[in-house]
């Protein structure tokens, strides 16, 4: 059985390999090749604006992305194989070279993400996961118990104030005018209002805590399912993806009027 050799991020890449495609294609490939990540929203919009104002400055944009801290940390170097005064023009576009570079970079990114996920899952045992979740759940349960205790205390106080208000004459008195002495009934009415508001806040906090406990249970179930996603399943999914990409590339090569933009490009 033939062994499939999956592409990875290159150690170095010529500027001439990244210069093709639409402005959006170009920015995405530059980030994938030089920073090993999809462009962030701010960087993506910034460079699209730069290119809208200066369409020929693709080489300048490449050098700028390659000089970032993230790019230096990634380990992929930009080879300066184009003259410093190079100006990009749409007439220079090469759809085949763009597709070849684009497919390789995207598969490399997917494999890198899968490897990171597999490493994370491999180091995460169900025992450790259960222990961590138990600690979080215990903390939230203790917090919930404290909230319930305070809620009970406030409920008792509100009931006592309601009884006191009835003893003072039934209906609550109107608040006292500024500058005058407050009556006993008005004071009780104000305190009752404040405690009623606090009681509502405590009830809302208790509901939020209950919701958090449900989210923790859901997270534990999702992580357990993720743990069951075996190494073999990941390899099969990657192989299927690569085969689909290669088939699309071959179909593109046999199309006389191939367009540089692919409708299935990832959205940023």
Image (cartoon, rainbow, N blue to C red):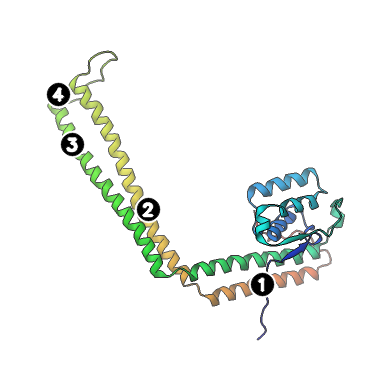
Residue that label 4 marks: 169
Q: Earlier in the sequence, mark 2 or mark 1?
A: 2
Q: Relative to residue 29, is residue 170 drawn left or right?
A: left
Q: Nearer the viewer, mark 2 or mark 3?
A: 2
Label number found at residue 60: none
- Residue 243: give x, y in percent of width and height: 67, 74
Question: Which residue occupies the extreme top position in the image?
Answer: 179
Q: Label 1, secondary structure: give it.
A: helix
Do the CB atoms of the residues marked 2 and 4 lie less than 8 Å apart?
Answer: no
Q: Earlier in the sequence, mark 2 or mark 3?
A: 3
Q: Relative to residue 130, is residue 108 drawn left or right?
A: right
* Picture residue at 17% right of the left edge, 28% below the top: 165
Q: Earlier in the sequence, mark 4 or mark 1?
A: 4
Quote the CA–CA distance across marks 2 and 1: 40 Å
Q: Nearer the viewer, mark 4 or mark 1?
A: 1
Residue that label 1 marks: 242
Q: Relative to residue 256, is residue 49 drawn left or right?
A: left
- Residue 267: give x, y in percent of width and height: 65, 55
Q: Earlier in the sequence, mark 1 or mark 3?
A: 3
Residue that label 3 marks: 159
Quote the CA–CA distance across marks 2 and 4: 44 Å
Q: Label 2, secondary structure: give it.
A: helix
Quadrant of the rendered image containing residue 108: bottom right
Do the CB atoms of the residues marked 3 and 4 lie less than 8 Å apart?
Answer: no
């Amino acid at each position: 059985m033939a062994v499939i050799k999956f592409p990875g991020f290159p150690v170095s890449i010529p500027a001439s390999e990244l210069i093709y495609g639409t402005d959006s294609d170009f920015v995405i490939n530059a980030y994938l090749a030089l920073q090993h990540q999809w462009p962030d929203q701010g960087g993506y919009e910034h460079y699209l604006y730069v290119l809208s104002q200066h369409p020929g400055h693709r080489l300048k944009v490449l050098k700028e992305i390659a000089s970032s801290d993230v790019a230096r940390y990634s380990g992929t170097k930009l080879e300066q194989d184009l003259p410093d005064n190079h100006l990009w023009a749409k007439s220079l576009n090469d759809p085949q070279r763009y597709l070849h570079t684009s497919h390789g970079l995207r598969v490399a990114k997917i494999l890198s993400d899968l490897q990171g996920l597999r490493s994370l899952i491999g180091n995460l045992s169900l025992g450790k996961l259960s222990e961590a979740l138990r600690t979080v759940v215990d903390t939230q349960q203790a917090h919930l118990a404290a909230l319930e205790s305070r809620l009970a205390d406030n409920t008792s106080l509100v009931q006592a104030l309601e009884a006191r208000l009835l003893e003072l004459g039934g209906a609550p008195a109107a608040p006292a005018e500024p500058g005058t002495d407050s009556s006993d009934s008005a004071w009780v009415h104000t305190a009752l209002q404040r405690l009623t508001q606090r009681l509502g806040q405590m009830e809302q906090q208790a509901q939020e805590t209950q919701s958090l406990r449900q989210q923790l249970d859901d997270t534990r179930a999702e992580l357990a399912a993720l743990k069951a996603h075996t190494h073999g399943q990941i390899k099969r999914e990657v192989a299927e993806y690569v085969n689909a990409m290669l088939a699309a590339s071959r179909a593109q090569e046999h199309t006389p009027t191939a367009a540089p933009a692919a409708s299935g490009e990832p959205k940023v």
